[in-house]
Image: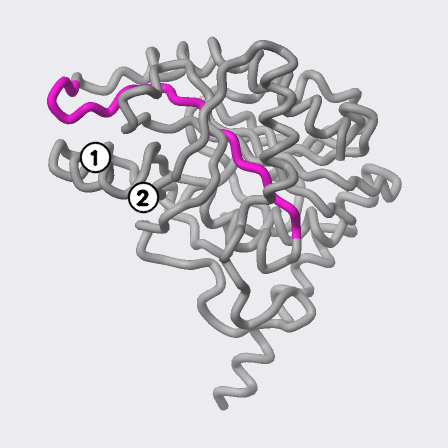
Amino acid sequence: PAKILTEEIMTNLTKQIEKAVKKIDSVSKKFRPTVGIILGTGLGALAKEIKEHCVIDYGNIPGFQKSTAESHSGKLVLGELGGKKVIAMSGRFHRYEGYTMQQITFPVRVMKALGATHLLISNACGGMNPKLKGGSLCIIEDHINFMGDNPLIGPNDEKLGPRWPDMLAPYSHELIKLAEDAAKRNNIEINKGIYVAVLGPCFETRAEYRMFMKFGDIVGMSTVPEVIVGVHAGLKILGISVVTDECNPDQLEPTDISKILANAAEAEPKLTKIMKEVISKI
């Protein structure tokens, strides 16, 4: 019985991926992107830079969920950016929205099935390192998963990836170097740091910030599930965070969502410029 259940779960995932690809193909005329992009809270402007081939609402794609987070438009954009064919999620899914880790990461599976070899991810985050001020950028060089869950739990389909993927270097050193070079050419200050992923949706307590500051530089409620599945799928990954609020536990102020979105908007042009240049160099 256990073997039958395992095969059924893996078959269902494969079929769901095939259904999503078929739907996207019917609209895009079998457009084949090489670069996947996931845009986080307040960071949807990069999608406007894409020379559109087509745009599909998540609700029209089998297996995609409804994006309920603030400022997430919930559209899949296919087109050209930096001279490359890209597929971009304008808005992502989060565990705190009530979705499973498998549902959150399903679009990454679809991107891979469509032909993507690289995955660029952005997010809004809290800055715990004192040098990371609101509106600054931070390249993710590693992460710590404090979400208490993992999208690879359950049966594994070897056709999608290995049972025990190696997380020694989930973020591509090559892409990190391209991002640093792009920032330098454009006189954009950029940092590198460790991203601590938490479940959300509540923000952290002072005690939690004090603990997390010992482990990492930035904290957020996304990205790590997609990175884990991206590694499992064999994608080269770059993650860039926009620091939207400062998380000094001794000077903590009530969270202001409008301020978070304003800081994201301030950093967005810099993020867009770096992402475009990295894509052009891939």
Taking the spot 42% from the left edge, 40% from the top edge, the residue there is 222
Q: Is residue 98 above or below residue 259?
A: below
User: Which residue type does callout 1 highlight?
Assistant: Glu
Q: Residues within 10 Å of mark 1 (few under 14, many from 20)?
A: some
Q: Would you say residue 247 sits in the magenta stretch?
A: yes
User: Which residue type does callout 2 highlight?
Assistant: Val
The quarter of the displayed image where residue 187 is located: top right
Where is the C terminus found, in terms of image quarters? top right
Secondary structure character of the magenta stretch overall: strand
Labels 1 & 2 near each other (Cβ < 8 A): yes
Taking the spot 31% from the left edge, 56% from the top edge, the residue there is 148
Q: Which residue is mark 1?
A: 204
Q: Would you say residue 57 sits in the magenta stretch?
A: no
Range covered by the magenta-colored residues = 235-252
Taking the spot 33% from the left edge, 11% from the top edge, the residue there is 259
Q: Which residue is mark 2?
A: 198
Residue 276 place in picture, x, y as percent: 69, 22
